Structure formats: C-alpha cells, structure tokens
Amino acid sequence: MKPFFSVLVPTWNNLPYLKCCLESIRAHSRVPLQICIYVNDGSDGSLEWLQTQDDVEVLHSDENVGICHAMNALAKIATAPWLLYLNDDMYVLPDWDTALHDRLLEIGHNRVMLSGTMIEPLETGNPCVIVADHGRHPSILDTVGLLQAAPQYQKTNWQGATWPPNVIHREMWDAVGGYSFEFSPGYYSDPDLSMKLWQQDVRHFEGVADSRVYHFGKASTSRIASSGKALFLKKWGISASTFTKHYLKRGQAFTGQLKEPS
C-alpha cells in the first residue's frame, strides 16, 4: 500500500532515543508510513543498528551536517505526498498519525501546516505543550503510566504550527525549497519554514491536540550553541517572536485561517 506519510527523522548519536522512537512508531501507527532516517555521524552504533532494520530507509553522513541538510536529503527519497518531520527524541502515542491524517482529509487542501502536540516533562512556559513527567530518558520512560494518562490530558487544537512533529504537503515543500541551509544546523529553521509558507499565502497553521507525542527534549540541541535569532531578523525584517506571536498566534486556541496582522 502506498504510504500517506513519509516520516523523516534526523538523528545524531542518540541510539537509545532512536530505538525508543522507532519502537513507538511501529507499535502505535495505523496510517501507511514510509520511515526515513538520516544518521549524522553514527559513531554511537546507530548506523550499524539501523542497517539491521528492514523497514526503514537510511541516509548517512560521516559528520553532523545538521537538521536542515538532513531533512532536505530525506525529502528527496520520500515517496508519500505528505512529509512528516519527527525528532528522534519523541515517543509517539496511539492515534498520533490517524489524528493528523483525519484532520488533513477534513481540511481538504494542501495549503496547510499541521503540528502534533507534545507532552514534555519540564515546564518551559510553552502554551502549545502538555506538561507531565513520565521520565526524562528512554531507560526510565513509564510507558504504562504514559499510555494510561495521555488520553486524560485536556487540550484543544491550537494556532501556530511550526515545530515537529509537523507535516506539510510535498507540493508546498517544493514551492518553498524545504528547510533553509543558512539556518544550519537548525536553530530557527522551524519558524523560517513557516514564514516561507506564509509568503506563499499559506494561512492554516494548526496544532492537532489528539496527535500526541512524548518529547524527552533537547537530546541533541543541548550539545550545540544556539544561533539563528539574528539571522531570522535580518532575513525577514521582523523577529521570530514577533512572527510567531502576532502572525501565527502560536499557542492560542485554533479558530481557523489566520489573517495579516494589523
């Protein structure tokens, strides 16, 4: 059966997280998927392990080329109409894919970006996430407690999809050229992609409450210095925070298509 989603997962020496991620995809996915993994470096054994897995397609670079390069390379081998970006430190929950699939069918067009809803163990002030600590490493993840509790956490669909898990159509990906290499290794590449879609008159940026993933958080980003904030400002003439707050209205209750801010 032809896949509906191509799940694109960049990884960088995060083997315990990657194993946990793939295990959850296999256990909790119902929509036909193609799984594509980009291995940065892989000296932790992740490349050798993936080569023993017959249900994934693997690309590899000897050094860490970052998320932007990895995602654009993965998109080239993707065969599904919808490209779904997932971090390697995410554990997907039941119906994560069906909720996205069903919402896309309801919307009925491809000028859209959707995000799933993260459950995170730490309070960061992010209004888009659900805060609940079920473990901060795959070795201590309380899967039984997580699976029992997750359906009870109250959340409604929200405005401002940017970060993974996110999904856009192949045609829109091609129209904006995927992720921008100048933001390598990846900081601020998410709002930049949303801004590029905005410039293509996309106004539907929706977080889907019933598509849930547990996000351990910063398994890779904590190892590299943050950058990209000034670059976003220079490129677009506004700050990323202005864009996400006043254009995307990120975190507010979803009410439909967005409009140009006054």
Image: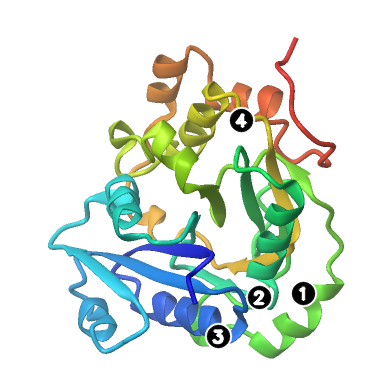
- Ranked by sequence position, the earlier of labels 1 and 2 is 2
Residue 190 x %, y %: 48, 40
**Camera-side mark, 4 or 2:** 4
- Ranked by sequence position, the earlier of labels 1 and 4 is 1
3D distance between C-alphas at marks 1 and 3: 17 Å
Dot 4, crowdedness within 10 Å: few (<14), some or many (≥20)?
A: some
- In the shown orientation, is residue 225 left or right of residue 97? left
Q: Are marks 3 and 2 in contact (CB under 8 Å)?
A: no
Which amino acid type is marked by label 1?
A: Ala
Residue drawn at (29%, 31%) of the image? 182
Please indicate, yes or no, whether residue 118 appears anywhere in the rendered image: no
Residue 66 x %, y %: 28, 50
98 relative to 148, above or below: above
**Camera-side mark, 1 or 3:** 1
3D distance between C-alphas at marks 1 and 4: 31 Å
- The local secondary structure at tag 4 comes to loop
**Camera-side mark, 3 or 2:** 2
Residue 64 x %, y %: 21, 56
- In the shown orientation, is residue 256 left or right of residue 63? right
State the residue position of label 3. 140
Q: Are marks 1 and 3 in contact (CB under 8 Å)?
A: no
Which amino acid type is marked by label 4?
A: Val
3D distance between C-alphas at marks 4 and 2: 28 Å
Mark carried by residue 93 = 2
**Camera-side mark, 1 or 4:** 4
Please indicate, yes or no, whether residue 60 appears anywhere in the rendered image: yes
Q: Are marks 1 and 2 in contact (CB under 8 Å)?
A: yes
State the residue position of label 4. 202
